[in-house]
Image: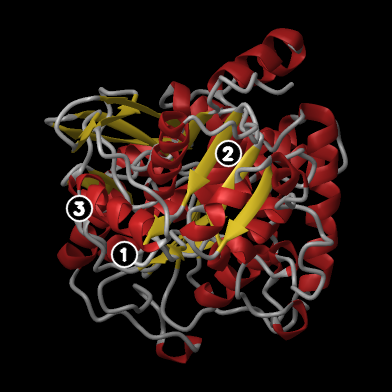
């Protein structure tokens, strides 16, 4: 449906500075007063400076800038506006207002326009990135056409194919300079625009979804693991459980984490979109579905920050939908370790500042490793065991383990301790065997419960117990230290039952789950 010739299209752009994609509307009015260009609606410094960029770009492009008082409003007026991507939308508003003043009968291109590009003083359009949030905001604004810089056309194509494969997106019109805008606003030009997820647009490009989600070692190069350790990884990967692996140096903890990464499933489209939104806020790539955190990480780097009006997600949010690898977890700073409480429990992190509280998504799987003592040896290990003997005093070992607080251990599903080298008489397990078992178990869990047990909420578990009185009876026969311990045991039991090919867990599954829940053997 087209508006009448007397109506002007509504102009939208991305409301930058927030993870959840939102749009803002650009409104303009003019009056017979001393020529002045005024911008209202709580613009940030870079947005206020756009007045000079817009005037220079319009005049350099051979277009007329109104010799009137121009008031440009950015709505909603209560939100601070950031970023230079608003330049093009504001310039379009000025161009359309000039046409209205001069009485030009330009047929409107569409009811709702979306623009996202920076302007150079010469009128050249510059790319500003953030294609995922821009496309999502354009969808929310119900825009008919999106105007972007030509240099951003490929990343918009990639984002459209990867994140919105089954969605009819607005048409995209890529421009190199503002001088092309006069023709681009005509309906025939809009009709010939491209959809950002149309494969005919760039047939020579490799689609981002065809790339691997992480740079882990290929399956064929993964060395075999001892059966006990391989089984732990199967349980954790199949049920999406948080786990902590403790053992001396050189026993294979790093290889185990490589296995775990290679066992991860493909991400759901909605998760991919959220990951892209978060990554665009930081300027970091979202192609890697895991984040490796070293012991030197500070709490602010993990949680995120809000300063100078900008929200910056941390490592917890960047790991959303994937895996958070915690190297040498006992060596982390105490505040950094304790910062994990909220993400592991609520799958969100809250940043509280004077300006307000901001919640960021961080639904990841925690995979940590660490030594058994400060020196990396094995307490009480004989010299001929093949493992390094511990040289620490008992008080030092006790102090080392006390770093892992009870609340953090209670939030981990599995804590596995390696104290002896692999037995050569027991054949190791190949990665291909574990991978097939994990895939079969995931399919069984998805069929029985709709999701992985590690992702089930406390409400989901209580609802399951209500539907299964026999299951509740078995669970009530066990003593637990907390409700969280009860739910973790049930989650593990569901995964173990599916791994054994059963729909419901039996007593053996509950017993094994309790053993796996013990912090240390």
Task: Tell me how far mark 1 sits from mark 3, CA to CA.
Answer: 50 Å
Note whether 416 is above or below 278 in the view shown.
below
Q: Nearer the viewer, mark 3 or mark 2?
A: 2
Q: Say which mark, if any, is on residue 334.
A: 3
Q: Is 119 on the left-hand or right-hand side of 477?
A: left
Q: Residue at x 21, y 75 (%)?
A: 392
Q: How is the image coloured?
A: secondary structure
Q: Say which mark, if any, is on residue 25.
A: none
- Name the element at disc 2: helix
Which residue is label 1 attached to? 121
Q: Residue at x 24, y 68 (%)?
A: 296
User: Looking at this view, is 139 or 520 the one in front?
Assistant: 139
**Number of residues whose C-alpha sits closer than 10 Å to that of mark 2, classed few (under 14), some (14–19) or many (20 or more):** many
- Name the element at disc 3: helix
Question: Residue 311: where, in percent of width, then height?
Answer: 29, 44
**Looking at the image, is mark 2 or mark 1 earlier in the sequence?**
1
Question: Residue 84: where, in percent of width, then height?
Answer: 33, 52
Q: Nearer the viewer, mark 1 or mark 3?
A: 1
> Does residue 342 appear in the picture of this structure?
yes
> Does residue 322 appear in the picture of this structure?
no
Task: Tell me how far mark 3 sits from mark 2, CA to CA.
Answer: 39 Å
Which residue is label 2 attached to? 136
Question: Residue 211: where, in percent of width, then height?
Answer: 70, 70
User: Looking at this view, is 423 or 108 the one in front?
Assistant: 108
- The image quadrant that residue 294 belongs to is bottom left
């Amino acid at each position: 449906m087209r508006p009448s010739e007397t109506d002007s299209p509504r102009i939208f752009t991305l409301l930058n500075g927030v993870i959840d994609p939102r749009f803002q509307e650009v409104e303009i009015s003019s009056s017979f007063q001393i020529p002045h260009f005024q911008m209202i609606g709580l613009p940030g410094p870079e947005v206020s400076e756009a007045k000079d960029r817009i005037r220079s770009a319009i005049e350099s492009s051979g277009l007329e800038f109104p010799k009137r008082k121009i008031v440009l409003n950015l709505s909603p007026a209560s939100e601070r506006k950031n970023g230079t991507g608003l330049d093009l939308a504001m310039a379009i508003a000025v161009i359309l207002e000039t046409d209205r003043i001069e009485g030009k009968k330009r047929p409107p291109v569409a009811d709702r326009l979306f623009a996202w590009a920076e302007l150079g003083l010469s009128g050249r359009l510059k790319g500003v990135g953030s294609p995922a949030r821009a496309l999502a905001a354009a969808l929310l604004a119900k825009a008919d056409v999106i105007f972007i810089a030509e240099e951003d056309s490929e990343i918009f194509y990639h984002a459209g194919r990867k994140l919105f494969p089954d969605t009819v997106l607005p048409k995209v019109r890529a421009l190199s300079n503002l001088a092309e805008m006069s023709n681009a606003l005509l309906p025939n030009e809009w009709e010939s625009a491209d959809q950002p997820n149309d494969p005919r647009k760039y047939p020579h490009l490799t689609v981002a979804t065809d790339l691997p989600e992480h740079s882990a070692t290929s399956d064929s190069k993964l060395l075999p693991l001892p059966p006990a350790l391989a089984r732990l990884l199967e349980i954790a990967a199949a049920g999406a459980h948080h786990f902590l692996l403790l053992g001396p140096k050189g026993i294979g903890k790093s290889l185990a984490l490589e296995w775990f990464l290679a066992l991860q499933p493909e991400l759901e489209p909605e998760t991919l979109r959220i990951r892209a939104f978060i990554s665009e806020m930081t300027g970091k790539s979202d192609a890697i579905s895991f984040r490796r955190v070293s012991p030197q990480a500070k709490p602010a780097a993990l949680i995120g920050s809000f300063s100078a009006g900008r929200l910056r997600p941390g490592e917890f949010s960047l790991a959303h939908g994937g895996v958070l690898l915690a190297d040498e977890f006992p060596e982390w700073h105490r505040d950094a370790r304790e910062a994990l409480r909220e993400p592991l429990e609520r799958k969100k992190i809250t940043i509280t500042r004077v300006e307000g509280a901001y919640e960021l998504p961080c639904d990841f799987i925690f995979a940590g490793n660490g030594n058994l003592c400060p020196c990396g040896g094995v307490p009480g290990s004989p010299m001929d065991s093949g493992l390094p003997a511990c040289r620490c005093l008992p008080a030092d070992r006790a102090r080392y383990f006390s770093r892992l607080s009870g609340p953090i251990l209670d939030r981990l599903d599995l804590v596995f301790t390696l104290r002896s080298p692999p037995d050569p008489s027991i054949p190791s397990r190949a990665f291909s065997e574990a991978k097939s078992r994990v895939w079969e178990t995931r399919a069984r869990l998805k069929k029985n419960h709709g999701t992985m047990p590690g992702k089930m909420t406390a409400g989901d578990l209580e609802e399951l117990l209500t539907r299964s009185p026999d299951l509740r009876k078995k669970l009530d026969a066990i003593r637990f230290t907390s409700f969280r311990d009860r739910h973790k045991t049930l989650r593990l039991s569901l995964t173990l039952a599916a791994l054994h090919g059963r729909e419901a867990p039996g007593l053996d599954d509950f017993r094994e789950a309790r053993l796996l829940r013990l912090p240390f053997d």
